[in-house]
């Protein structure tokens, strides 16, 4: 799908330029785009370095664990099929807390552990269980507190208030997460009846 | 409502910084050394985005310079206008669930072309900040444990992505419009 989309952009761009009789703009656009990409990546070093530093301190100070204590009751409510003392619960809680804080490095390993633990409860190993579907729905639609990369890009291109989008981001992800939870429980009912 | 949302936004980063540092101090973490170790990875992480950004920004740049982008916007505008969706952000909405790097490239292009504080710039920034690369996550997590039938997981993920997108359009319109 990504392949198709990229090919479509490139080829249709070249064809349209040729039809418009300005095929020479393609070369200029290629060089300009590549230069812009490298400049942006270098510009991102600043904010990404700073944020990874802060997040390392947050991790060491146990902020993830503190947040996990708040998330835990909610997780137990959303996963009725998983026993409360099962190791999967801890991994799910850890993954979601790290996701909220934007700690990708901590979120992925915890997520993989959660999936492996949920697989142990799975009677048909090739088929996704309801708990797995719920976990991934929460994971992909998770609330994000600080989208550091895009804030960095906004600053790079001269925004007066790079962080102004935090409020709209949190609200929009909250809407997405609500729908994910509702849709998941609806599908869970529908699939059980079949 | 707009004032409240941006007002709260002003506090998130300073507030989080304060809490993290105080918590670190209370737990007797060597905050300075820990910060430096974490920040060391910043260079590598930022440089790793280069290939994705080059691929996507070159493609978008060619697409825009050729006049094809204007054509697409011209045709989609009457379809999307009644819903208040600017056609310029559609490529981003399509790419976001597939590839985070590619979506970042499209967002960068819009932020640079229209300005980060414009309505379009704020909208695409919000879209980039929300919602994850749904399909990538599904394939990595299910792939890791050998599950082949995803059942309703992709549908739920897509529904959430569409909701987040429409919510972004409405919220950004109210907040920054």
Image (cartoon, rainbow, N blue to C red):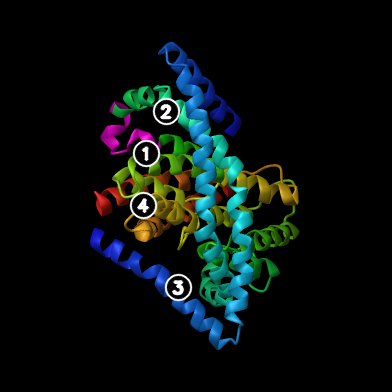
Local SS, label 2: helix
Residue topped by disc 3:
B16
Closer to the camera: disc 3 or disc 2?
A: 2
- First in sequence, mark 3 or 1: give its number: 3
Q: Decide if residue B71 is on the left or right side of residue A29.
A: left
Q: Find disc 1 in the rendering and name its residue.
A: B113
- Residue B78, given in percent of the width and then of the height, sits at 28, 27
Residue B141 lies left or right of residue B35; in this view the side is right
Which residue is disc 2 drawn over? B64
Q: Magenta span: helix, strand or loop, mainly?
A: helix
Q: Which residue is located at x 34 percent, y 23 percent? A: B75
Q: Are marks 3 and 1 in contact (CB under 8 Å)?
A: no
**Disc 2 packing (10 Å; few <14; some 14–19; many ≥20):** some
Chain under disc 3: B
Q: Earlier in the sequence, mark 3 or mark 2?
A: 3
Q: CA distance from mark 3 to mark 4?
A: 24 Å
Q: CA distance from mark 2 to mark 1?
A: 10 Å
Q: Residue B151, percent across and down?
A: 62, 43
The subunit carrying tag 2 is: B
The image quadrant of residue A52 is bottom right
């Amino acid at each position: 799908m990504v392949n198709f989309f990229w090919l479509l952009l490139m080829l249709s761009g070249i064809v349209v330029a040729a039809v418009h009789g300005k095929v020479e703009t393609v070369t200029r656009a290629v060089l300009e785009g590549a230069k812009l990409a490298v400049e942006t990546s270098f510009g991102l070093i600043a904010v990404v370095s700073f944020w990874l530093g802060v997040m390392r301190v947050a991790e060491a100070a146990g902020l993830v664990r503190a947040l996990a204590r708040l998330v835990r009751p909610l997780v137990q409510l959303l996963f009725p099929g998983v026993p409360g003392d099962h190791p999967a619960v801890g991994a799910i809680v850890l993954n979601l807390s790290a996701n909220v804080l934007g700690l990708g490095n901590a979120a992925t390993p915890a997520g993989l552990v959660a999936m492996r633990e949920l697989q142990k409860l799975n009677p048909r190993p090739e088929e996704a269980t309801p708990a797995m579907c719920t976990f991934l729905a929460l994971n992909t639609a998770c609330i994000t507190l600080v989208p550091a990369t895009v804030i960095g890009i906004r600053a790079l291109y001269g925004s007066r208030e790079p962080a102004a989008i935090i409020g709209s981001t949190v609200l929009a992800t909250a809407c997405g997460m609500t729908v994910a939870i509702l849709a998941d429980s609806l599908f869970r009912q529908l699939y059980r009846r079949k | 409502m707009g004032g409240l949302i941006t007002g709260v936004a002003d506090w998130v980063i300073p507030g989080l910084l304060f809490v993290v540092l105080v918590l670190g101090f209370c737990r007797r973490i060597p905050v300075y050394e820990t910060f430096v170790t974490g920040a060391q990875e910043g260079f590598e992480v930022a440089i790793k985005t280069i290939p994705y950004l080059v691929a996507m920004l070159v493609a978008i740049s060619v697409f825009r310079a050729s006049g094809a982008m204007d054509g697409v916007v011209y045709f989609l505008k009457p379809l999307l206008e009644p819903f208040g969706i600017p056609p310029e952000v559609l490529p981003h909405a399509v790419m976001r669930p597939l590839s985070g790097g590619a979506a970042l490239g499209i967002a960068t292009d819009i932020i640079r072309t229209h300005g980060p504080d414009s309505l379009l710039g704020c909208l695409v920034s919000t879209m980039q900040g929300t919602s994850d690369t749904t399909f990538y996550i599904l394939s990595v997590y299910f792939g890791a444990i050998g599950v082949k039938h995803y059942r309703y997981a992709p549908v739920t993920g897509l529904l959430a992505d569409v909701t987040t997108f429409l919510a972004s359009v409405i919220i950004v319109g109210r907040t920054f419009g």
